[in-house]
Amino acid sequence: MLKKGFNTYKFRNLTINIFTHDVVFIYIGKKGTYIRNVYKKDIVRYLRLAAMSFVVILISSLIFTVIPSSEASADIISGGYENSTERAENEADENIRVYSTNDINNILEDEKLKNDLLLSAKTDYTVPVNNIPLQIRTHKVKENESLASIAKKYGISIDTICGSNNLKSYDYVTPNITLRIPNKDGILYNMKEGNNIVNLSNKYKIPVEKILAANNFRNADFIPAGELVFIPDAKPQNIFDGFLWPVSGRRVTSGFGWRKSPFNSEYKEFHKGLDIAARYESVRATKYGMVSYAGWMGGYGNVVIIAHPGGWKSLYGHLSRIMVKPGQYVKQGQQVARSGNTGRSTGPHLHFELIKQGGHTNPQKYLKR
C-alpha cells in the first residue's frame, strides 16, 4: 500500500520525494542505493498516455529501466571494475549514481532550501527602480521630422515630448521649434502660482513620493512659480491618439450609410455622417487642427469645418452657436460650438462627419470611446 509522509511517498523499496519542479526517486536495493530526478512536466506527459491506475507501475518501470543488472550493481557498490574501459563506461552513465545516507540527506536539504527560496517573497518580481539622474536636452525640429521619429531617437514616448512641451497634437509638430527632451518618460511642468506638489499628484495620478524622488527640491512645501518639476510616468491630459467624441453623449440617432429620409419615408438617401443626440450642449474639436470654415451652410444650418493633419477633416452641423473663426487653431477637446436645430433639421442634435483624404468615412470606426 502506498504510504504518504511529508512531501514523500513510499512504496516498498521505492521512495518518492515531491518538490516544486521535480520529483526525486530513491530506490534502496540489496546491491545499493540509486537516485534519479524526473521533472514534473515529464511525469504529466506520461500520465496523459496511461490511466491513473497504472501511474505507479509506469513510474516504477522508468526507474527500474535504468538499474543495471545485479552483476553490474555489485561492481558499482564495491567500486571494483575489471578494466579502465568498463570504469569509463559506468562513469559516463549520468543517470545512475550511488549515494550514501549523508549524500541523500544533503540532496534533500538542498531541495528544501531551493523550494523555500522559490516560494519566498525574496524571489518575487519587483518593478525596476529608475535611479538615472534627470537630464534635459533640447532638439530643434527639422523639416518633415515627426514626433514618432524624435521619440525613437531619444528613447522616450511621444506622450513625454507632447506633455513636456505643451504640444497640441500627436500628429504634427512645427518645424524649427526647440523641444525640451527629458531622458526618461514623464512630463516637464512649469510650476504655476498657487500650485503645489499635492495638486500635481492628484491631477496626474502620480504618488507624491514618486514626484519628490524624481526632483531635487530645496523646499518641497514651497516651490516658486516658474520652477521646472518633472512628473515621472505622467501623460498629457489634453490630447490622445485618435479622434475624440465631439459631444458628451454617445447615442447615435442616425448612422452612416443608406437610410429613409427623415422628411419623406418614401425617399432613400445616403447619410454621410452621424446624427448624435445632443440638446444645445458643448461641441468640442475631435482632434487638433485649423478651423477652415465657420458659418451658414444651407440645410446644414450653422457649420464648423476643421482641417486636421494627415488629410483629415471634420464637420459639425445644425449648430445653435459658433465659437471659433476661420484660420483659428484649436486643441483636441476645445469647445468650438453648441449643438442645435438650425437648417433642415427634425430636432436639436449634432450632425458629425469625418472625411479622410477627400472621401467620407464612417466616424464610428475612428471615434475613441
Image (spheres, helix red, strand yellow):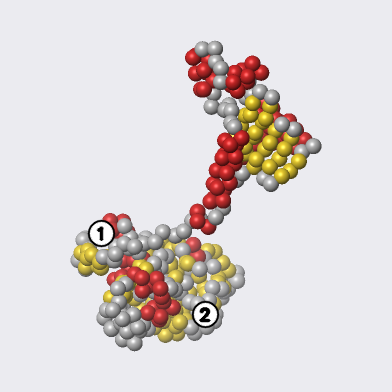
- Under circle 2, the secondary element is loop
Label 2 Cα crowd, 10 Å radius (few <14 / some 14-19 / many 20+):
many
Q: Which of marks 2 and 1 is in front?
A: 1
Task: Give the label on residue 296, or none.
Answer: none
Q: Can residue 285 be seen in this view?
A: no
Q: Distance between the residues labelled 2 and 1?
A: 39 Å
Where in the figure is residue 297, as x and y percent of width and height? 40, 77
Q: Write down the quadrant of residue 321 in the picture.
A: bottom left
Q: In this view, does 180 lie above or below 56?
A: below
Where in the figure is residue 93, as x and y percent of width and height? 54, 23
Along the line of sight, which residue is nearer the eye, 38 or 271? 38
- Under circle 1, the secondary element is loop
Q: In the rendered structure, which amino acid carries the disc numbered 1?
A: Glu
Residue sitting at x 57%, y 44% = 109
Residue furthest top in the image: 82
Q: Is residue 153 above or below residue 251?
A: above
Residue furthest bottom in the image: 194
Q: Is residue 320 visible?
A: yes
Along the line of sight, which residue is nearer the eye, 108 or 359? 108
Q: In the rendered structure, which amino acid carries the disc numbered 2?
A: Ala
Where in the figure is residue 259, as x and y percent of width and height? 56, 67
Q: Write down the quadrant of residue 251 in the picture.
A: bottom right
Along the line of sight, which residue is nearer the eye, 288 or 321? 288
Task: Give the label on residue 145, or none.
Answer: 1
Residue furthest right in the image: 1
Q: Mark 2 points at which residue?
A: 278
Residue sitting at x 50%, y 77% = 248
Could you tell me which quadrant the N terminus lies in? Answer: top right
